[in-house]
Image: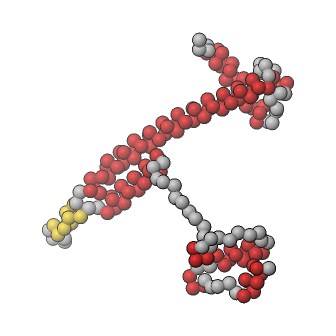
């Protein structure tokens, strides 16, 4: 038999107080928590887990609604931009004569950005893999070093363009010592 509205309200109030006390760092076996009506530390722990799970379910439902609304908005924008991005339009010269037919590249860019936004919203893109390598693409050598040594390495690694150079002999000596 499902809980009555009064029982649900009592449970919600008890759980809210339990969460408040736990946020203050009150242990589960403290009298303030047990006086809320919990028979034991374990019962209070289980109820907190239930409260957190219920909250997580509510959040997931809200996120799902938000995603659906965003998808609908993207659909409307895509519907509006699609014809300009896919159907060639006449290009007129100064006299009003048709000299070519072209698609609107700004509309194409808009459509691509909308598609990219949808892919991010739905998590369709594959994660990007990144790898840090050492000199010439080889293995990165790891060792412990002082803050001074690390700072020199960062300075060397951050150099680009014409100022990029091999480390000076004293820099290499500092790093190897």
Residue at the far front: name it: 139
Q: Residue furthest top?
A: 1
Looking at the image, residue 6 sits to the left or right of residue 177; the answer is: left
Q: Which residue appears at 79% of the width and 79% of the height?
A: 177
Residue extending furthest right? Answer: 31
Expressed as whole percent of the image width and height from the top left, the position of residue 124 reads 45, 49
Q: Is residue 96 visible?
A: no
* Quarter of the figure with residue 94: bottom left
Q: How many marks?
A: 0
Viewer-side residue, 165 vs 114: 165
In this view of the protein, can residue 58 be seen by the observer? Answer: yes
- Where residue 138 appears, as percent x and y from the top left, is 60, 73
Residue visible at 42% across and 43% down in the picture? 71
Q: Residue at x 62, y 71 (%)?
A: 139
- Residue 134 higher or lower than 115, as above or below: below
Q: Is residue 89 left or right of residue 170?
A: left
The correct choice, above or below, for 11 with respect to 84 in the image is above
Quadrant the N terminus occupies: top right
- Image-based side of 20 in relation to 162, left or right: right
Instruction: Say above or below: 136 vs 27.
Output: below
Image color mode: secondary structure
Task: Where is residue 11? Give x, y as percent.
Answer: 68, 21
Which residue is pictured at 80% across the width and 29% down the height?
Answer: 28
Q: 165 or 69: nearer the eye?
A: 165
Q: Position of residue 9 (x, y in %)?
A: 65, 19
């Amino acid at each position: 038999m499902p809980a009555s509205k009064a029982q649900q309200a009592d449970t919600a109030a008890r759980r809210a107080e339990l969460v408040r006390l736990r946020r203050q760092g009150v242990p589960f076996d403290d009298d303030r928590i047990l006086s809320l009506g919990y028979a034991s530390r374990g019962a209070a722990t289980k109820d907190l887990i239930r409260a957190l799970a219920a909250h997580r379910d509510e959040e997931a439902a809200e996120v799902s609604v938000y995603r659906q609304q965003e998808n609908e908005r993207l659909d409307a924008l895509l519907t509006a931009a699609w014809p300009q991005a896919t159907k060639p339009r006449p290009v007129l010269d100064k006299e009003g004569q048709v000299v070519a037919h072209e698609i609107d590249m700004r509309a194409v860019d808009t459509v691509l950005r909308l598609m990219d936004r949808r892919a991010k919203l739905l998590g369709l893109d594959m994660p990007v893999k990144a790898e840090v390598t050492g000199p010439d693409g080889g293995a990165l050598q790891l060792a412990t070093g002082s803050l001074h040594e690390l700072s020199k390495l960062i300075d060397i690694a951050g150099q680009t363009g014409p100022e990029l150079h091999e480390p000076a002999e004293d820099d290499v000596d500092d790093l190897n010592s």
